């Protein structure tokens, strides 16, 4: 049972996402940063994911795309602004289908007793951009992705 929590308070420009994984922080970090592992969990259940290979370090770009059975592609990209493995990553996030609407994501991983709390604060340029992301169905897509991440983490034990 997932403990995913997505908090988007009215009138604010941010979304807070938390979830706990039954895995050590280093293992969660690995699954979040190794392209071949990211491709196994990122995206909707009905899409296939490709991850541009990149070294996850401060200053490097990243890009991930999802492909539907009908051949449609939905891509996301950004730049890593701060990387402190295995505890913190700050990066930009932009959906290529809606260019110019960039959020800044701060990910932190905290371990306690072999479990890791995943925490992301996504800060948007405006309340309208944040509300648009919420209205897009991001929570259900996020839940699918993080459930698959849990499966990947189980396979790494």
Image: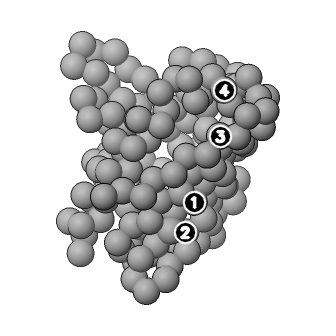
**Label 1 with label 2: CB-CB less than 8 Å:** yes
Q: Residue at x 55, y 69 (%)?
A: 109
Residue wearing tag 1: 119
What SS does tag 4 mark?
helix
Q: Residue at x 54, y 17 (%)?
A: 97
What SS does tag 2 mark?
strand
Q: Residue at x 35, y 72 (%)?
A: 22
The label shown at residue 8 is 3
Q: Residue at x 49, y 83 (%)?
A: 112
Q: Position of residue 99 (x, y in %)?
A: 64, 20
Task: State which tag comes first along the sequence, 4 or 3.
Answer: 3
Mark 4, mark 1: which one is toward the viewer?
4
Task: State which tag comes first along the sequence, 2 or 4.
Answer: 2
Q: Quadrant of residue 135?
A: top right
- In the picture shown, does residue 21 fall above or below 143? below
- Mark 3 Cα shell of 10 Å, populated few (<14), some (14-19), many (≥20): some
Residue wearing tag 4: 131
Mark 1, mark 3: which one is toward the viewer?
3
Could you tell me how far apart the alpha carbons at marks 2 and 4 are, in whole angstroms? 26 Å
The label shown at residue 109 is 2
- Mark 2 Cα shell of 10 Å, populated few (<14), some (14-19), many (≥20): many
């Amino acid at each position: 049972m997932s403990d995913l929590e997505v908090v988007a308070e009215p009138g604010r420009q941010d979304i807070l996402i938390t979830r706990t994984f039954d895995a050590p922080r280093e293992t969660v970090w690995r699954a979040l940063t190794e392209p071949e592992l990211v491709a196994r969990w990122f995206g909707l259940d009905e899409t296939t994911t490709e991850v541009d290979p990149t070294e996850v370090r401060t200053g490097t770009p990243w890009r991930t795309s999802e492909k539907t059975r009908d051949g449609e592609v939905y891509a996301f990209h950004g730049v890593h602004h701060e990387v402190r493995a295995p505890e913190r990553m700050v990066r930009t996030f932009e959906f290529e289908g809606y260019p110019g609407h960039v959020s800044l994501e701060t990910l932190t991983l905290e371990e306690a007793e072999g479990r890791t709390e995943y925490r992301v604060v996504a800060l948007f340029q405006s309340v309208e951009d944040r509300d648009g992301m919420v209205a897009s169905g991001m929570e259900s897509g996020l839940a699918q992705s993080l459930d698959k991440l849990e499966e990947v983490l189980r396979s790494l034990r």
